[in-house]
Amino acid sequence: MTGHRRLTLAGSVAGAVIVALDGTVLSVAQPTLQRDLDASFGQVQWTSTGYLIAVASLLVFAGRLGDRYGHQRLFAVGMLGFGAASAGIGLAPGIGWVIGLRVVQGVFGALAQPATLGMLRAAFPADRLRGPIAVRTAAIGLAAAVGPLVGGALVAGPGWRAVFFLGVVPAVVFGVLALVVPGPAPAQPRPARLDLPGALLLGVTLAGLVHVLVTLPEPGWTTAAETTLVVGTALAFVRHERRAARPLIPPEVVGSPAVGPALGILTVASAALSGTLFVSTYVLQYTLGLDSFQSALRSLPLAALMVLAAAGCAVLLRRAGARRTTVSAMVVLALGILLLTRASGTLALCAGFALLGAGFGTVMVAATHVVVRHSAVESAGVAGGLQQTAMNVGPTLGVAAATVLMGPGGERLLPLTVLAAVALAGAVAGGALPGRSTVAIGGRSDDDHVDPGARSSVPARR
């Protein structure tokens, strides 16, 4: 591996971890933040909702900007802005400043996240993407595991403001490195005009969708009106994209027989996992009477198996192919959810969470690999933006569905059964992913020798 590829991988991993760690430590800091700033519960909720809306609405457009101006440049801007906003939150005098700066943080996070995948696609040959994506995913899993511990230690020690200072230095360091170290030229040397109307329509659609999902447990006329707006803008976006000469999302990406199903699987898997974790939190603490520390210990196998599964998924992809790997992993995820529908003892709970981690860690690497691997280099940013959008919308959808299905009584059987069925539907969708081709000389599949960047505009159907 060359020096530039090592630095690209380090930047991609660091960017993904900084953003993931920020979200996990925030959940620990919110109660103390609410008390210190004399904020209402609704205001504290907006520190998360405002960030999520900003990120979800801009990810795809940010990916297109990376395709046009260079992923490394967008990554640098995103990291520096994210770090500056984090420092500002740590110094914020009131809750209004925190909410506003969280939205700013979301804007810069949206610039950085697609670039972490776009940089990998530009730096590594298509047949060597498995390893870097596996490393990146394992690092995200590790951040999710240690985030609550780090956040708890900082809140108990220096205070909640230290949580936001945590990522400032690494964000600035990697942002500066991305600016000063020469990177590859943009994949589109003579870029076409940006599809600003398409970006606006998609942004409004996704922002409205996220807000509807967040407020879904409290339906009303405003939710119905917003849902109508979301449907209307979505239809307008589809119509615009079909007629646009240079659409925001290239047809060869959205129409790919591999990329489309992979994005759907990422959405389904993240929805099933997040919904299950939401239900399990109530089961552990209210039904079983465990405190937060005891609950965290029983769910620890999830993080451990997610890291191990992500790290080993590159081998599975090489030997079994994306189709069999993803289908098997989605079945494992569904089995973990079903086990948790009845689990009450420590062993059964740990086994259920272990299956969740093993299944989701494998799916995340396998489906992300398909999205990045089967997108042309000049569309890598858009593909990365779509992948990140799936990973942001999916959890919101899963938590909203779980909240509605649980009802006021906190029943777990119905929501977990439905979420398991959703995971199995993802396993069925996995059958549309590319399989392992006939093994060629050298032990690689024939598919490994073909770079989508060198193919015709629409990948061949497998």
Image (cartoon, rainbow, N blue to C red):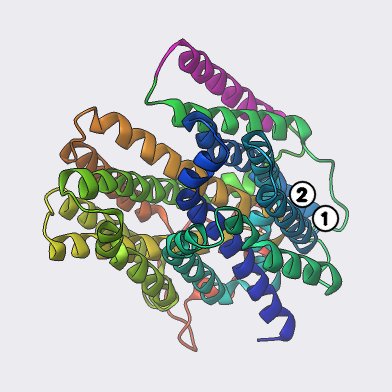
Task: Report the front residue among 349 and 39.
Answer: 39
Magenta stretch, residue numbers:
219-243
Residue depicted at x 84% and y 45%: 192
Determine if residue 235 is in view.
Answer: yes
The residue depicted at 65 percent of the width and 37 percent of the height is 94
Q: Cβ–Cβ below 8 Å for labels 2 and 1? A: yes
Residue 65 is labelled as: 2
Q: Percent from the top left, x then y, of residue 196?
A: 78, 34
Q: Amino acid at mark 2?
A: Leu
Residue pointed to by mark 1: 69
Report the magenta stretch's main SS. helix
Residue 381, given in percent of the width and then of the height, sits at: 68, 54
Residue 146, magenta (yes or no): no
Indicate the position of residue 350 as horizontal and vertical percent values: 21, 64
Instruction: Tell me the SS state at disc 1.
Output: helix
The image position of residue 1, as x and y in percent, is 65, 86
